[in-house]
Image (cartoon, grey):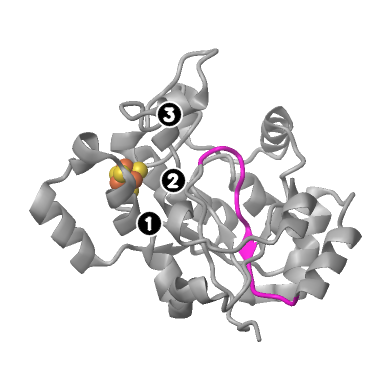
Amino acid sequence: EPRRNHPVVPSAATTFAPDVVEKAVELEDFEKLAKDLENASPLEIMDKALEKYGNDIAIAFSGAEDVALIEYAHLTGRPYRVFSLDTGRLNPETYKFFDTVEKHYNIRIEYMFPDSVEVQALVRTKGLFSFYEDGHQECCRVRKKVPVVQVDPVFEGMDGGSGSLVKWNPVANVGGNDVWTFLRTMDVPVNSLHGQGYVSIGCEPCTRAVLPGQHEREGRWWWEDAKAKECGLHKGNIKEEIHGMENLLK
Ligand code: SF4
């Protein structure tokens, strides 16, 4: 019997794949939803998500162009929640942007922080920049896993197949240029790092601007092999994905 908890896993990916909402649902519900929303617009998908789950769900906001999701939620006229993962290592511009977004939409972002004991242990043992020496996986695991544990402790034990994770991606069918057109049209505030050549926005020590024509991943964990450039958050914690919804949302 799947649990009725609704684990919330913020996306650490900085490609435009914002994970709006995650909630455990019955597979049948999910397949029906996928069919119903097959050709829906981002606004319609967001509206349906908020109508169906209300405050049981929250928009994962990374501080990048996924602000579009907040604009969509705002446009529905429904109440909505937003959360952000503060790893403690974000760019100053991103913190300022969070504040700007809170004021612009008159909302409070639900910040989530890593476990201080775990961060202390890592930093006291290996220093502040261990990721440059032995890879980003450990630091990402420590700094990005906590919301999963806080929101749903059982989620860690998904090896036993105790639940299903559903992500909604209302803008998954929208191209990057269209997102930017939308943001400009709606006069949505954006992170000033975008104007400095940042395509990917994440932790300050692990993210840099890229030149035109460079792949955005050149701006992230550039000192590591390409094959290691996968976010620590997604590697271990998400055991089960339901492909029906993936298809809907991609
Ligand atoms: Fe640590 Fe870098 Fe991962 Fe941020 S992106 S959690 S600083 S390794």
Bin the neighbour count of mark 1 within 10 Å (Cα to Cα): few under 14, some 14-19, many 20 and up.
many
In the image, the residue with mark 2 has its CB under 8 Å from the nearest atom of ligand 1: yes
Identify the element where label 3 is drawn: helix
Between the residue at mark 1 and the residue at mark 2, the CA separation in whole angstroms equals: 9 Å
Between the residue at mark 2 and the residue at mark 3, the CA separation in whole angstroms equals: 12 Å
| Residue 122 on the magenta segment | no
Seen at 28% across and 50% down, the residue is 139
Q: Are marks 1 and 2 in contact (CB under 8 Å)?
A: yes
Q: Earlier in the sequence, mark 1 or mark 2?
A: 1
Which three-letter amino acid code belongs to the residue tagged 2? Answer: Cys
Q: Earlier in the sequence, mark 2 or mark 3?
A: 3
Relative to residue 21, is residue 201 depicted above or below? above
In the image, the residue with mark 1 has its CB under 8 Å from the nearest atom of ligand 1: yes
Res. 144 mark? 1
Along the line of sight, which residue is nearer the eye, 179 or 10?
Answer: 10
In the image, the residue with mark 3 has its CB under 8 Å from the nearest atom of ligand 1: no
Q: Position of residue 79 (x, y in %)?
A: 67, 70
Whether residue 112 sits left or right of residue 37 in the image: it is left
- Report the span colored magenta: 14-26
Q: Position of residue 87 (x, y in %)?
A: 33, 53
Seen at 43% across and 51% down, the residue is 99
Question: Which residue, given by chain and number where applicable, does mark 2 sit on?
Answer: 231
Question: Which residue, given by chain and number where applicable, does mark 3 sit on?
Answer: 226
